Image (spheres, helix red, strand yellow):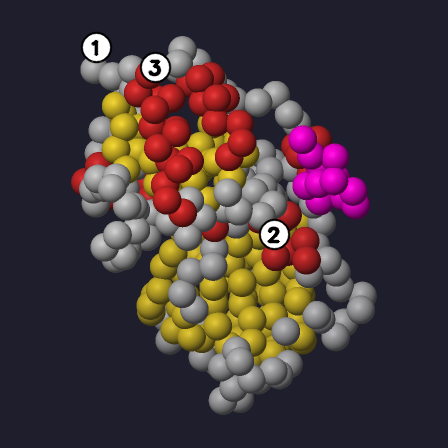
Amino acid sequence: MEPKKIILCPNPDRDTGMKATKSAIAILRDMGFQTVVCSPFRDPKTDAFGDLPSKPLLPELKGADLVITLGGDGTILHLAKLAALHKIPMLGINMGGLGFLAELEVGSLNALRGLKSWDFPIEERMMLDVSVLRDGKQIYTNMGLNDAVIREGPISHVIHLKVFSDGKHLADIAGDGAIIATPTGSTAYSLSAGGPVVEPVAQTMVVCPICTHNMRFSSYVLSPEHVLTVELERNGRKPVYLFVDESRAFSLRQGDRVVVRRSKHVTRLVRLSEKSFCEIFAKKMLPGGLLNEK
């Protein structure tokens, strides 16, 4: 039987010197796994991985059994779309800040030995398909694990949005913008904007305004069966942008329609610990939680 193939994608800005990556490789090879190092980003610096040989990611995804990221949640988000399209599970090793999506902290690499039997739970996380229609034509598509964000540009101004669910008017938003988040994304930008916390394995969509002028409107939590449409109106010539999982900004025009629906693809996250979401949330987000981290 061929050994399982594991791709390691270290963020060179986090794993300087590739110390954690080299340690992870040693543990994985000791268990008989095949490993390959790939950059999680396009056009990495020539010496980004030091003396570690690396290969282009896309060709290596074919036949891969697992992708391990070493970095922050941003590294996982950056790779989530590709991993989902190839139906490859991911395991995150946190070398960033909160590390909500990561399963392991960099100080607990020995927990990787839990992969040896290849018998571990996998969480499936809902994703979003996002498209933009302009004059009836689709001009943009993307897929995200966290959220789709419509917000003002570098010039501060109030933007006006109309939100529809299955073609029926749901809300008017006047403020800095709006966030449509998955349960996974409910602990990201949406939470900072006052949105609710949703258990990440749930199947819902959260509509959260950003600094709205309407104090009676906080957020909606909706069934994923709905198709949400956000229309831009009365924004003049000032820029408004769409971001999907911190991707490059896509410039929107008055009259554009942003359509968001549940994707048929999912992000599959490997679980090696038995900590519940509530435990992780309390540890990382509640006052004093990180102070008790060992």
Give how far across and how far down residue 268 sits, in percent.
Answer: 44, 32
Residue 188 badge: 2
Q: Is residue 134 above or below residue 266?
A: below
- The Cα atoms of the two marked residues, 2 and 3, are separated by 35 Å
Horizontal side, residue 33 vs residue 164: left or right: left
Front residue of 249 and 48 = 48
Residue extending farthest to the bottom is 237
Query: Is residue 270 located in the magenta-colored stretch of the structure?
Result: no
Kind of residue at disc 1: Met
Residue that mark 3 sits on: 31
Question: Can I make out residue 208 in this image?
Answer: yes
Using residue 214 as the reference point, say whether residue 266 is left or right of it. left
Q: Amino acid at mark 2?
A: Ala
Q: Is residue 160 above or below residue 96?
A: below
Label drawn at residue 1 = 1
Relative to 62, residue 97 above or below? below
From mark 1 to mark 2, how far is it between C-alphas?
41 Å
Q: Residue at x 56, y 84 (%)?
A: 155
| Region in magenta | 282-294
